[in-house]
Image (tube, rainbow, N blue to C red):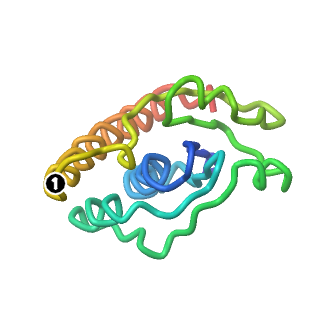
Amino acid sequence: MTKHNILFVCIHNSARSQMAEAYLKELGGELFLAESAGLEPGKLNANVVTVLAEQGIDISKHNTQSVFDLFRQGKKYSAVITVCDGASAERCPIFPGKVRRIAWSFSDPSSFTGTQDEILEQTRTVSQLIKKQVSDFISEASEFSYWL
């Protein structure tokens, strides 16, 4: 079975895209190869690492990377999914070939404020929203695999 390459993109590749990549690998690894990148790569968000570790997913060794580097390498994807706000998503490069562009919008964990416990709880909420969206994506792709 051919696996389809999926790229998740957000601003810094430090939180939302990392979570989406991790969930697709965990939930849909038999159908997909997942990767993530950022428009302006930053540092991996420690709260995201903690929240995913609570779920048995270790991304502590992940690095952030630039979507533009992947573009220059000529990488090809079946779908490029932005997980940031719409205005930022518009800054993503257009990848060559038949690629489906999908936009999902999630709050940015790096912008959360409050106590450490409050920030972790907000991050958990976003992680569950992303996990649900990834799960729905897998279900849709399984039912309508012709779009890939």
- Residue 35's spot in the image, x, y percent? 59, 54
Q: In screen coordinates, is 95 left or right of 133? A: right
Residue drawn at (22%, 44%) of the image: 122
Residue drawn at (44%, 50%) of the image: 24
> Residue placed farthest to the front in the image?
114
* Residue 52 picture quarter: bottom left
Residue drawn at (43%, 38%) of the image: 138
The quadrant the C terminus occupies is top right
* Residue 33 picture quarter: bottom right
Element under label 1? loop
18, above or below 90, in the image: below
User: For mark 1, what is the residue?
Assistant: 115
Q: In screen coordinates, is 69 left or right of 39? A: right
Of residues 87 and 78, the one nearer the viewer is 87
Q: Which amino acid does label 1 sit on?
A: Thr
Of residues 58 and 67, the one nearer the viewer is 67
Total tally of numbered discs in the picture: 1
Of residues 125 and 77, the one nearer the viewer is 125
Q: In screen coordinates, is 55 left or right of 22? A: left
The local crowd at label 1, few if under 14, some if 14 to 19, many if 20 or more residues have their Cα within 10 Å, is: few
- Residue 78's spot in the image, x, y percent? 67, 38
Residue drawn at (65%, 60%) of the image: 65
